[in-house]
Image (cartoon, rainbow, N blue to C red):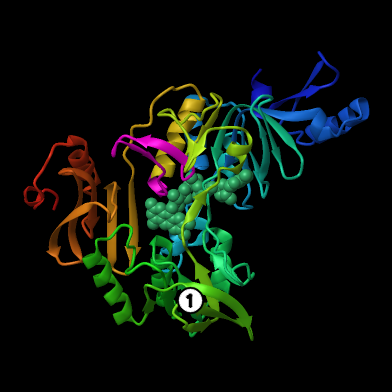
């Protein structure tokens, strides 16, 4: 029934045992809502209750992983209608430029969208933007959004990513504070930044360090405040973190390490932040980047297995066979490092998204890809693969100290992760080193990747 596949089929429950099918043609987009009205009159139930739109594929969330899943589905199923339900009102976009390229004039907002509207139209993807999924019933295979509309799926993807961790402190919910994560956050901060604006950046991890550099490059007077002893301390060995921190300070960024906010207060159009050490920092803006928590609420409420994320097997299938998860929210067995974990990296979200899309369309292939990640802090850029944790022992092979070289992260003499600092296009070589998995002496790694 090609016309129906192009347009979508809806099944409506009338009385027990009776079913009405409504076919929506692209040229008649209102058929569905008219049918809902008719059903409300016949059944006495609300249109949404009486009739759930039905799709072979529903994707909830969908910024990076969800958009990639559309591509994956379409590799195997050219026509099956897809519903993409997104809390954000924007088309799916890539977040990395929000803390880098958009601030440095290297990209425009239009260039960060993964696809334009015409792509979704051509791919028969129904977009519900600005809608949050608030209910999931695996028995009836139904998702319900925050306007009370229900949708039925054959296969469902939860690509809900993560949400910024919020501080639990006096004033931490002031509307002027920005827990930086989305395009709306970028647009809001961008609109309030000018030469001489002052900003406090809370958090010294990826987002905090990148945003401090981005704001500084735009003439903002930046102070950083974070509890750890040095920048990006969960990844960088201390020597490197301290060297980068010194570089930040040389450029004019004030860094307050080993300290943290205890309260925020709105004062004369600015924000006053009090710190544990008793300092007060008054600034026009406060940006907070202290990590994310995976969005697992829907999965938990539906009885799916969760740990630090939604538990998935190697096919990215949750504990329910018709429900999948991918991207920042997926707790999976990472073959590269032989343990279960979540990754909060763009390339992982793209890779898992594409794979999960293929599997939803019937591929049945395990996810074996080893993703890489990247960051830029002023002129220190890097790509990394595997487990790069400062808890592991690190062998540093520098061509130029703290600028150009390769860091090898070792656990029991095995290479678990590799970070290539201002060394490019060597990700595959790093993957091979990790895959080899044999015991190595750190000194033997010197020159392994150049
Ligand atoms: C500012 C910034 C910079 C970054 N820079 C880098 C980088 O340099 N390198 C790198 O490797 N990674 C980077 N990342 C991380 C990378 O962007 C993430 O790993 C990636 O976005 C994860 O994609 P995702 O689709 O799994 O989740 P997300 O991007 O979190 O998308 C999830 C989407 O689901 C929506 N959603 C959640 N719950 C619901 C619901 N119930 N109903 C409907 N919609 C819902 C959310 O609003 C969101 O749009 C950066 C992230 C940010 C925020």
Q: Quadrant of the N terminus?
A: top right
Q: Which residue shows up at 23% across the image and 59% down it?
A: 421
Image coordinates of residue 122 in percent, x first then y, are 58, 36
Farthest residue, direction front: 277
Position of 405 relative to 379 (above/below): above
Residue 64: say if magenta. Answer: no
Provide the secondary structure element on which disc 1 rests: strand
Q: Is residue 173 visible?
A: yes
Position of 147 relative to 358 (above/below): below
Image coordinates of residue 84 in percent, x first then y, are 61, 39
Image coordinates of residue 419 in percent, x first then y, are 24, 53
Q: Which residue shows up at 43% across the image and 28% down it?
A: 315
Q: How many marks?
A: 1
The response on whether ligand 1 sits within 8 Å of label 1 is: no
Farthest residue, direction top: 17
Q: Which residue shows up at 50% across the image and 67% down it?
A: 288
Residue density around tag 1, few if under 14, some if 14–19, many if 20 or more, within 10 Å: many
Image coordinates of residue 345 in percent, x first then y, are 40, 49
Q: Is residue 64 visible?
A: no
Name which quarter of the figure residue 157 lies in. Answer: top right
Q: Is residue 76 left or right of residue 232?
A: right
Instruction: Tell me the residue that label 1 is attached to.
Output: 200
Residue 346: say if magenta. Answer: yes
In the depicted view, which residue is nearer to us: 86 or 203?
Answer: 203
Q: Which residues are magenta?
A: 327-347
């Amino acid at each position: 029934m090609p016309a129906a596949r192009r347009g979508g089929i809806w099944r409506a429950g009338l009385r027990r045992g009776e079913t009405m099918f409504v076919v929506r043609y692209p040229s008649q987009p209102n058929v569905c809502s008219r049918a809902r009205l008719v059903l409300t009159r016949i059944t006495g139930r609300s249109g949404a209750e009486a009739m759930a739109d039905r799709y072979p594929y529903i994707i909830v969330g969908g910024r990076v992983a969800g958009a990639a899943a559309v591509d994956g589905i379409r590799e195997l199923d050219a026509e099956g209608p897809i519903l993409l339900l997104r809390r954000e009102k924007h088309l799916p976009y890539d977040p990395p430029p929000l803390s880098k390229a958009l601030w440095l004039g290297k990209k425009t907002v239009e260039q960060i969208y993964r696809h334009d509207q015409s792509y979704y139209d051509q791919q028969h993807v129904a977009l519900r933007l600005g809608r949050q999924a608030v209910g999931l019933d695996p028995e009836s295979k139904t998702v319900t959004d925050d306007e009370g509309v229900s949708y039925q799926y054959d296969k469902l993807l939860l690509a809900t990513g993560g949400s910024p961790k919020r501080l639990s402190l006096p004033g931490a919910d002031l509307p002027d504070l920005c827990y930086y994560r989305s395009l709306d956050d970028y647009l809001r901060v961008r609109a309030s930044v000018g030469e001489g604006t002052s900003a406090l950046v809370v958090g010294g991890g990826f987002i905090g360090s990148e945003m401090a550099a981005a704001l500084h490059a735009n003439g903002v007077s930046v102070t950083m405040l974070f509890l750890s002893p040095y920048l990006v301390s969960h990844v960088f060995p201390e020597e490197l973190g301290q060297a980068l921190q010194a570089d930040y300070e040389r450029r004019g960024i004030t860094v307050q390490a080993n300290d943290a906010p205890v309260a925020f207060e709105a004062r004369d159009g600015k924000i006053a932040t009090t710190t544990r050490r008793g300092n007060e920092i008054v600034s026009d803006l406060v940006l907070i980047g202290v990590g994310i928590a995976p969005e697992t609420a829907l999965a938990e409420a539906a009885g799916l297995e969760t740990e630090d994320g939604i538990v998935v097997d190697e096919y990215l299938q949750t504990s329910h066979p018709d429900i999948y998860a991918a991207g920042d929210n997926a707790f999976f067995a990472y073959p590269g490092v032989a343990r279960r974990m979540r990754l909060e990296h763009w390339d992982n979200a793209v890779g898992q998204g594409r794979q999960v899309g293929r599997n939803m369309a019937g591929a049945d292939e395990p996810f074996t890809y080893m993703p890489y990640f990247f960051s830029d802090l002023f002129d220190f850029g890097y790509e990394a693969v595997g487990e790069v944790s400062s808890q592991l022992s690190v062998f540093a092979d520098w061509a130029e100290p703290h600028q150009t070289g390769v860091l090898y992260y070792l656990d029991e003499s095995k290479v678990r992760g590799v970070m290539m600092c201002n060394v490019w296009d060597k990700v595959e070589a790093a993957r091979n080193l990790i895959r080899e998995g044999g015991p190595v002496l750190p000194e033997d790694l010197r020159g392994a990747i150049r």
